Image: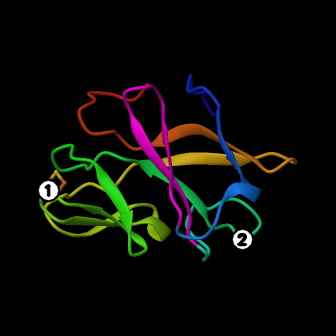
Amino acid sequence: APSLPYKSVKIANVSQLSPNKPVTFNYPDASSPAILVKLGKPAIGGVGPQQDIVAFAGTCTHMGCPVQYQGERFVCRCHFSMFDPAKAGQTYQGLASSWLPQITLTVDKKGDIYATAVNGLIWGRVKNI
Ligand code: FES
């Protein structure tokens, strides 16, 4: 497989996370908000002991408004798009037609969680890194 030039960035440690308490960070660069969350149930692409820790771009794929984690889903308040964090960011309501880009995570032996890539195109970009 080709190696991607995404940087590996430490976000948090597994021990710091509580279910449904999101952690914000930026990835792959300072102008790209992102959200990490422990869902409390297994998720597609989930990492950690329960395979329930996921991260997504924090920018709605419709017109770029910020999304918020609320009620076990990501919601965009601009036009009420909703994205399922357990199903790889699938959009299921509202005007967005593209899924929310999922950020690939890895966990090391100490429980440190790293962002390592973005799976999908962040709104406003013409290409991935
Ligand atoms: Fe998010 Fe329109 S910008 S639904």
Image location (x, y in percent) of residue 24: 48, 46
Beta carbon at label 2 within 8 Å of ligand 1 = no
Residue flagged by tag 2: what amino acid is it?
Gln
Instruction: Give the quadrant of ligand 1.
Output: bottom left
Circle 2 sits on which residue? Answer: 50
Counting residues from the start of the chain, the first of labels 1 and 2 encountered is 2
**Residue at the spot x=70%, y=56% of the render?**
16
Residue 125 lies left or right of residue 13; in this view the side is: left
Residue 117 lies left or right of residue 112; in this view the side is: left
Q: Tell me the quadrant of the picture where the N terminus can be found.
A: top right
Query: Which one is in front, 86 or 36?
Result: 36
Above-or-below relation of 113 to 22: above
Asked if the magenta segment contains residue 38, the reply would be yes
Residue flagged by tag 1: what amino acid is it?
Cys
Image location (x, y in percent) of residue 74: 35, 63
Q: Tell me the quadrant of the picture where the C terminus can be found.
A: top left
Above-or-below relation of 87 to 126: below
